[in-house]
Amino acid sequence: MNTPITPLRMLLCCVVLAAPMWTLAASPAAHHTYQVVSGDTLDKVIRKTMPESPLRIEILRNAFVQQNPQAFTKSPPRSLMVGVELNIPNHDDLLRSYMVPGQSAGNSGMSRGGGYSTADMNMSERKNWVRFP
């Protein structure tokens, strides 16, 4: 007796549960900012805005500096200027760019701007390498 209604209920539940995902996929990524206050350092801002990030702190620092060059002093110890509004990098984009399948975040492969990976070479190419004890 309930057989025709059950698939309809299941379909309705799937649509209701999937609707938020469709909305998130269709909407552009939210643009987050952070207002720098006195005493803030870049590491403090990173800990406040991305506390659970698996990426190394150097990667996050570089992303902040690249997106906010106006927020740092020009002197050698580059420090944050108070009152500047920082654009927070999109963490999902950073993860996608650094967490490539088959490579770790610190591995320098061809896609990382130079260098090479010894895993890509076979033993015959490495047989003439100099070895130290």
Image (cartoon, helix red, strand yellow):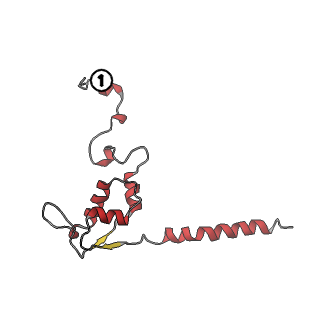
Q: Quadrant of the N terminus?
A: bottom right
Above or below residue 79? Residue 114 is: above
* Crowd rating for badge 1 (residues with CA inside 10 Å; few <14, some 14–19, many 20+): few
Q: In which quarter of the image is residue 120?
A: top left
State left or right for residue 120 relative to residue 84: right
**Relative to residue 52, is residue 7 drawn left or right?**
right
Q: Position of residue 24 (x, y in %)?
A: 50, 69
- Residue placed furthest toward the bottom: 83
Kind of residue at disc 1:
Lys
User: Which residue is drawn at the image coordinates 62% and 68% (left, top)?
Assistant: 17
Q: Nearer the viewer, residue 80 or 62?
A: 80
- Where residue 47 appears, as percent x and y from the top left, is 35, 62
Which residue is denoted by mark 1 in the rendering? 127
**Between 59 and 112, which is closer to the camera in this rendering?**
59
Query: Where residue 61 sits: x, y (%)?
Result: 28, 59
Farthest front residue in view = 39
Residue 124 screen position, x and y as percent: 33, 25
Residue at the right extreme of this rendering: 1
- Element class at badge 1: loop
**Front residue (pair 5, 64):** 64
Seen in the picture, residue 103 relative to 45 is either above or below; the reply is above
Quadrant for the C terminus, please.
top left
